[in-house]
Image (spheres, rainbow, N blue to C red):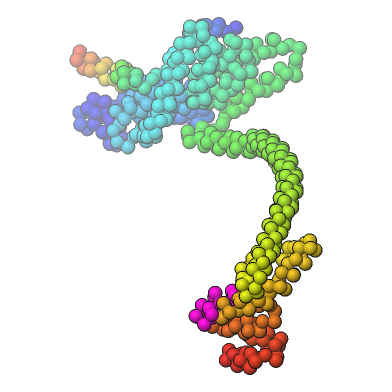
Amino acid sequence: MINFDEEIAKFQPSLEVDQAEEVIHSNDLSDITDIIKTMLKEIKDRN
Amino acid sequence: MICPACNKSIQGKNNRCECCGEDLTVYKKVYMMSNRYYNEGLEKSKVRDLSGAVIILKKSLELNKRNTDARNLLGLIYYEMGESVAALSEWVISKHFQQETNDADRYMELVQANPTRLENLNQTTKRYNAALLSAKQGNEDLAIIQLKKVTNLNPHFVKALQLLALLYMKAGDMEKALKNLTKASKIDVSNTTTLRYLKELNEVTSTSAEDGKAERKEERKVIAEPIAFSHAPYKEDKPNIWPFVNLIIGIAVGILGAMFLILPTVKDNYQSEYSKKINDNSAAVNEWQQKYDSVQKEKESQDTKIDGLNKQIEELKGSQSDDTIYEQLIKTAALYINELQKGSSSQIDYLAVADELAKIQNDKLEQTEAVALYTNIKQAVGSNASAALYEKGHDQYSARKYDDALKNLLSAYELDATNVDAVYFIGRSYHQLGDYDNAKKYYNIVIEKFPDSWRVNDAKQRMTDIQ
């Protein structure tokens, strides 16, 4: 049986146009490539 | 491929960057994995497994944030699910990583080219957020109203459809909940939340309707419908013309309804009002006609009275005139008696008597004695008076006073019809006045009535002169 209040609480507000710029700037765009690059750099630095 | 170390473009299949000498072996494997996830996400999106595609595409971007194809596709999926701002964000980031030949340009232009559409999307989002707040505060009815508007403005807003269905379920309106969940499942066939709500809905309806097996079967069929639809091929979001067509049809139906329902009523009202006015006017006309008839009758009776009074007036006038006539006769007789008392006939003023005699209206004398008296006086005075008048008229004729002469000569002829001289000079007087018709008339009297008179030759001569 669904707990309606819990289900409603799960819903998150949708992004509005005014918030778009903030969302884009705060977006963490780091990917695996960045992590590998950092790791390889650290390895090189150790050597 | 772009070198992660120096961001330079790398051509060919070399495993080392020609610019910075970075070993690209690991990077290439990571990029291949990212592309593989992209392909998988594309396959899922083609069968409308949008939630699954979002998860896979996010994995693809976690491996390679520069995979613009994956990011653009993720934006499209967000847009399809009603998350327009999230979609724009992905396209903006995609544009950041690939400035040229990026499909994100086209997608953003399509959205931003129509400011009204962009504003509608923003309003839809704001209303959804307001509805969500209302729902969290326990105002489910208000939230339902707001969400119905949201889903009307953007029928692809999956989260709004799900929340609306949840609120309907809470309110016990399972049919509406099922309807919204069906819509949501048509957009995103494998959305976990949608499927969970459908399952819950199915359980609730099956337990609450154990005695209605037939109905339950129908419901199961309905619930199964979105799953069957889930295999529908993915299509690009095309401009939906059906709302416009429906609007046109609605307007046409409205106009036809007005023509067939409202217009006859209005027409009947006008006709009844018009008939009432006609009846009122007819009644007024009849009333005026009756008044006119009564006035006409009254006028006729008044005319009759006036005619009677006029007759009485005429009779009174007649009696008065009679008195005047007889008075003149008596006056003439008295004058004649006075003249006779002078003794000598040469002293009698016949002209004075003749003048008074001429004033009597002898044709109106009715009493026999009066007529006899008039005749006696006229015979006694006539020839003498006629001769005297002739003399007077002749003198005036000689003095070229033709009008005055004519009066005395006519009186002389009237007093004595045998006075041929008077007749001749009447003709002469008319002749001199240029009245040739009357001149000829009196010349003819001389010629025809007095053929033995010496005036005949003169009369004939004058007739010849006129002709």
Q: Position of residue B394 (x, y in %)?
A: 56, 81
Number of on-image labels: 0
Residue at the image point whose x is 67% and y is 86% from the top: B446
Q: Position of residue B141 (x, y in %)?
A: 55, 12
Q: Quadrant of residue B245?
A: top right
Q: Quadrant of residue B198?
A: top right
The range drawn in magenta is B395-409
Q: What kind of secondary structure does the magenta stretch mostly adopt?
A: helix
Residue B304 magenta: no
Residue at the image point whose x is 73% and y is 18% from the top: B215
Question: Along the line of sight, which residue is nearer the eye, B442 or A3?
Answer: B442
Residue at the image point whose x is 67% and y is 23% from the top: B221
Q: Can the viewer see residue B196 in this picture?
A: no
Q: Can the viewer see residue B383 in this picture?
A: yes
Q: Is residue A42 left or right of residue B285?
A: left
Question: Along the line of sight, which residue is nearer the eye, B148 or B185?
Answer: B148
- Name above or below for residue A5 compared with residue B123: above
| The C terminus of chain A: image quadrant | top left
Residue at the image point whose x is 62% and y is 35% from the top: B258
Q: Is residue B186 left or right of residue B373?
A: left
Residue B402 magenta: yes
Q: Position of residue A30 (x, y in %)?
A: 31, 19
